[in-house]
Image (spheres, rainbow, N blue to C red):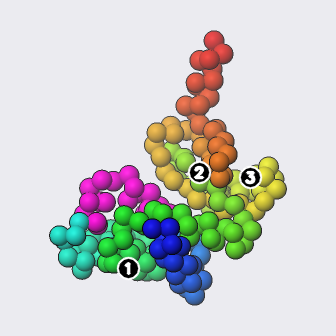
């Protein structure tokens, strides 16, 4: 799958570059891939070989209609139509890494209980750039288990600024 994921990621990157919506599209693809990973029912529906490809693609179009760009919808639909829906998270991860490497940037996966505004993402990216010395692209995953604050992962480094983590630290100190 590694070579195939790289080929898909390259193709995605070419389409996204041609459309000129890099940040928006990669963010939407990232979110959909995480939803697919976390939702067994959706994953089963999109990977079931007994469901015709056209029906699986219609499910994608129904889910993303009005919530994602046409480019994102088309890319996800294409992967689902070719029977590679299970590989979508890996493809998107490779796409993000490829895009970051091409622009000498790092990807910061941020988990937050609520969606972050564009201004909050911008300030967070600036802060992370100051601490890492590299430009950082922030992708946000809404995760209600965070409770409050954020958990940021850049490569192997995790910065846990969540309320849950702070409460655990307080418990340990008592």
Quarter-of-image position of residue 83 = bottom left
Is residue 70 placed above or below 115 in the rendered structure? below
**Residue drawn where x is 46% and y is 39% of the image:** 145
Which stretch is magenta?
A: 29-47
Of callouts 3 and 2, the N-terminal one? 2
Residue 161 in percent (x, y) is at 64, 38
Left-right relation of 109 to 42: right
Is residue 6 or residue 125 the one in the foreground? Answer: 6
In percent of width and height, residue 99 lies at 64, 71
Of marks 3 and 1, the one in the foreground:
1
Mark 2 sits on what residue? 110
In the image, residue 43 sits, relative to residue 58, either above or below, namely above
Crowdedness of circle 2 by 10 Å Cα count: few (<14), some, many (20+)? Answer: many
Foreground residue among 7 and 59: 7
Residue 69 shows up from this direction: no
SS for dot 2: strand
Q: Quadrant of the N terminus?
A: bottom left
Look at discs 1 and 2 and give the one toward the viewer. 1
Q: Position of residue 163 (x, y in %)?
A: 58, 33
Residue labelled with disc 1: 78
In the image, 143: left or right of 157? left
Crowd band around label 3 with a 10 angstrom C-alpha radius: few (<14), some (14–19), many (20+):
many
**Residue at 72% over, 72% down:** 103
Does the magenta-highlighted stretch encompass residue 39? Answer: yes
Name the residue beneath numbered marker 3.
128
Q: CA distance from mark 3 to mark 1?
A: 35 Å
Magenta stretch: dominant secondary structure: helix
């Amino acid at each position: 799958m590694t070579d195939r994921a790289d080929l898909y990621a390259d193709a995605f990157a070419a389409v996204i570059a041609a459309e000129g919506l890099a940040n928006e599209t990669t963010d939407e693809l990232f979110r959909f891939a995480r939803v697919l990973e976390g939702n067994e029912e959706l994953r089963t529906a999109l990977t079931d070989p007994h469901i015709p490809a056209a029906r699986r693609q219609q499910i994608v179009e129904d889910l993303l209609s009005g919530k994602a760009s046409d480019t994102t919808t088309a890319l996800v639909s294409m992967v689902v139509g070719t029977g590679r829906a299970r590989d979508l998270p890996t493809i998107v991860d490779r796409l993000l890494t490829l895009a970051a490497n091409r622009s000498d940037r790092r990807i910061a996966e941020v988990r937050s209980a609520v969606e972050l505004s564009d201004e909050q993402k911008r300030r967070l990216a600036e802060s992370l750039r100051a601490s890492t010395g590299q430009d950082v692209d922030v992708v946000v995953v809404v995760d209600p288990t965070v409770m409050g604050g954020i958990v940021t992962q850049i490569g192997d480094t995790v910065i846990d600024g969540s309320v849950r983590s702070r409460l655990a630290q307080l418990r340990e100190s008592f």
